[in-house]
Image: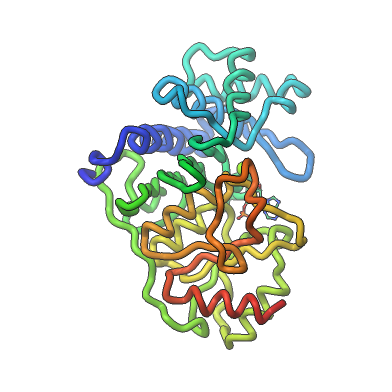
Amino acid sequence: MAALDRLGREARVAVDVVRAVVAFMRRVEAGAVGRLLTKDDSTPVTAIDFAVQAFVASRLARECDDIPLVAEEDSASLRADAALADAAVAAAGALVPDIDRGRLLDLVDRGAGTAGSRFWVLDPIDGTKGLLHGRQYATALALIHDGRVEVGVVGCPRLPLGQDVEGGVAVAARGRGAWWTSPAGSDAGPLAVSRTSALSVARVIRSWEDSHGDVERLGRILDGCGNRVPPVRMDSQAKHVALAAGSVDVLFRLPLSSNFRDAVWDCAAGALLIGEAGGRVTDLSGTPLDFSAGRRLVRNDGCVASNGALHEAALEAVRSSR
Ligand code: AMP
Ligand code: MG
């Protein structure tokens, strides 16, 4: 705990906010707060996504109001769907006192901030499909400064790591380290990547969704290095936490199309966690992720993250699989 107390003000605010979200999500999962609604378009969004974004936006505005917020959701679908908006207001009521529809819309739209020299990045519910189907999901909050991640916090209400069988919060601050802490904040243990040094026995992790990555190419990569270990499939930046904790060794994000670019909120917090736990994160060509290009990583193609020891071999395996 003391390690977290010594972090800078923004990092401490981020940890407090994400802890509150994890506590809220446990109550949601227990059925105490409303129902999860799903919009029927291809990526699901629930009332909970908006409620969490509104809550985080309100806390950041109160405590760090000069830093813009770049977040996944906007209010368009709330404005078009009164039932969804009502459900989001009801859910947010447990987090933001006296919230009404107008305030909810304003708070959600705070996420349209400018991705300039310094900004927060938020995915309120990363892996909404995971949330809906009983798998992993996360709340990811990061602070970007001059294109680099300074603070990364990933709350994982369902991730079984160490003794916190009911989930926890992973925290990283650039140059300071990375930790896994219980939602209540009673303890914090350092996160450290694995020491696995051969790709042939590496534990690989990838998206749960086949549609989020080139599964055939991953198969070729694993065949090429004689790896017969079935990849772990997991939604959200819970993957990055698992890698930072040493539970897996390499993460591949292999875009299905050559023009797909990841959103910054799907990578930023998790990337710093892995770096500060001793690992390495690049795109498929070995270039570091560049967070100075706006809401998407337009200068990077895909992602390879590893424990560091395996990184060059993983990049070479990617090159050979083209
Ligand atoms: P993951 O569970 O790692 O696949 O990450 C979930 C995130 O992937 C969601 O927040 C989506 O924004 C994002 N996503 C949506 N479509 C794609 C796609 N075609 N390829 C990669 N990621 C996607
Ligand atoms: Mg999301």
Give the image location of residue 282, x and y in percent: 54, 63
**Is residue 62 found left or right of 282 in the rendered image?**
left
The quarter of the image holding the C terminus is: bottom right
The colour style of the image is rainbow
Residue 46 visible from this viewpoint: yes
Instruction: Choose top left, top right, bottom left or bottom right for residue 160.
Output: bottom left
The residue lying toward the viewer, choosing from 308 and 191, is 308
Tell me if residue 51 comes above or below residue 173 in the rendering.
above
Residue 299 is drawn in which quadrant? bottom right
Residue located 51% across and 65% down the image: 305
Q: Residue furthest left?
A: 2
Image location of residue 119, percent across then percent down: 50, 35
In the picture, measured across the screen, residue 184 lies left or right of residue 30, that is left
Residue 315 at what x, y percent from top left? 57, 74
User: Where on the picture, by quarter, is residue 278?
Assistant: bottom left
Which of the image's four quarters has the N terminus?
Answer: top left
Q: Does 319 appear above or below 74? A: below
In the image, residue 207 sits, relative to residue 83, either above or below, namely below
Q: Along the line of sight, which residue is nearer the eye, 137 or 29?
A: 137
Outermost residue to the bottom:
226
The residue under the point 41% across, 45% down is 150
Identity of the residue drawn at 63% across and 50% down = 297
Q: How many marks?
A: 0
Q: Residue at x 33, y 45 (%)?
A: 182
Asked whether the viewer can see residue 142, the reply is no
Residue 304, position in %: x, y? Answer: 56, 66
